[in-house]
Every structure is written in structure tokens, then in C-alpha cells.
Amino acid sequence: MSESGLQVSDLEDQDRRDIEVLWEYHVLDSGPVDGDFLLALGSHDLRVADHAGELYASGAAPLVVVTGGAGKVTSKEWSTSEAARYAERLVEMGVPRESLILEDASTNSSENFSFTRKLLLDRGIEVRTGIIVSKPYMARRARATAGRQWPEVRWFTRPQVMPVWDHPTPDVPLDRMINLMVGDLQRLRVYAEAGFQEPVDVPDDVWAAYERLAARGFDRFVIK
């Protein structure tokens, strides 16, 4: 399936139910919490940067690290790194440049954490608690990745929480969202088996929803 104009009304009833099941499982929110730093995971969705800026303004953490070079979507759409785009947005929101650190070499979620860890160590910045800011449906996998790649930090997740059907926009099409959610669900098992992230329990009904959506053609980011 392509990204060309898919609407919620085009989906089968079972598709909609399965998408809602995946969304509810993926969205892992720790609730209001303070930390040593915010780690904004780069992606095609600038709302992640917006949410990081809001959390910074609320006093959640004194430092924002934006991480991301070129990802599987942004490598085809942006001429600059995800970190640079996020940083530009955060400065526009009033985050001081001295409160920002850019990590712009990573190309996947494991590197987001391992490269940022090395960057802060090299700069002599000690952190004990971190707040992950990500797309809503990336939160659970991000937390599992953090636990494996940077276990000495106590991690919290603060995605931008919203109903699933409010998430798609012209810049974040519905079809792309579904395909990414399906791919992220599969990676929770595949990447845990590969040692990239901590094992997590995937309930049978969630896995069944993943399998149905992949079989329906929402498999663009499924590892074959």
C-alpha cells in the first residue's frame, strides 16, 4: 500500500480495531516527572520536538539532547539531520542554545542511545535520570532500547499522548503511521532476540493484530 491519500474511512472495521490495539500498546507514558535531561528521538514528526520544548518550558529537565542523523523516512525527505531540524524548532520555541546538545550521526534507535551516551561521557556530563520524548507509538520500544543500550540511567517516557485518529496529518500520513506502528511492533520481538533492546511482553491479542495488519499489506517497515 502506498501513502497516497489513505483515509480512515478506507479502512476495514477489523483494520481500525487492530490499529487501535497497537496504538494503545505502543503508547507508554510515565506521566509528569523530572529528570537530568530530555532525549528527543529524531524522526519525520516535528511534533516530537514541539513536545520536548513544552516539557523543557515546564521545568521537566534543564538539558535537551536531540538525537538523529538520517532515518528510514527522513533520509528521503530532508536535506539536514533530524537533530538539526529538531534543534531549529526548539530554538524557535525559546529553548536556549546552551541548553541544547545535538547528536546527528545515529541512524537507528539503538544508536540514538549509544551515541548519545558516548557524547555525554566525552563531554563529562553525568546523568542519572532521562526522559525519552518520542512519537507516541515509539515509546515502548524506545524504553526497551534505552534499558539495553544505556542501563545505568533511570528512564522515563513522555510521548505526546493523543487519540490514534488525531495523530495523522498531511506531513504524517495515515498510511505511514500504520506501517511504522506495524514495523515497530515486530521489532519489539526481533530486536530483543538480537540483543538490541530489553525483552518485553507482547500480549497475544497485540501480536495477532500485528499479523493481520501485516497480512493486509501494512508491511513496508516489516523486517522480511
Image: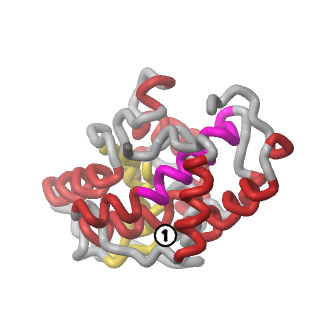
Q: Which residue in the rendered view is the most extreme toward the right?
A: 9
In the image, 131 versus 169, the foreground residue is 169
Type of residue at label 1? Thr
In the image, 100 versus 72, the foreground residue is 72
In the image, 145 versus 161, the foreground residue is 145
Q: Which quadrant of the figure has residue 216?
A: top right
User: Where is residue 198 drawn, in percent x and y?
Assistant: 31, 72
- Residue 19 horizontal side relative to residue 151, left or right: right
Q: Residue at x 74, y 62 (%)?
A: 17
Q: Residue at x 43, y 63 (%)?
A: 141
User: Where is residue 45 drawn, in percent x and y?
Assistant: 57, 42
Q: Which quadrant does the N terminus fall into?
A: top right
- Dot 1 surroundings within 10 Å: few (below 14), some, or many (20 or more)? many
**For mark 1, what is the residue?**
157
In the image, 195 versus 212, the foreground residue is 212
- Residue 117 horizontal side relative to residue 11, left or right: left
Q: Residue at x 77, y 52 (%)?
A: 166
Q: Which quadrant of the figure has residue 205?
A: bottom right
Q: Is residue 124 magenta?
A: no
Q: Classify mark 1: helix, strand or loop.
A: strand
User: Where is residue 13 drawn, in percent x and y?
Assistant: 81, 56
| Magenta highlight: main SS | helix
Stretch in magenta: 171-186
Colour treatment of the image: secondary structure
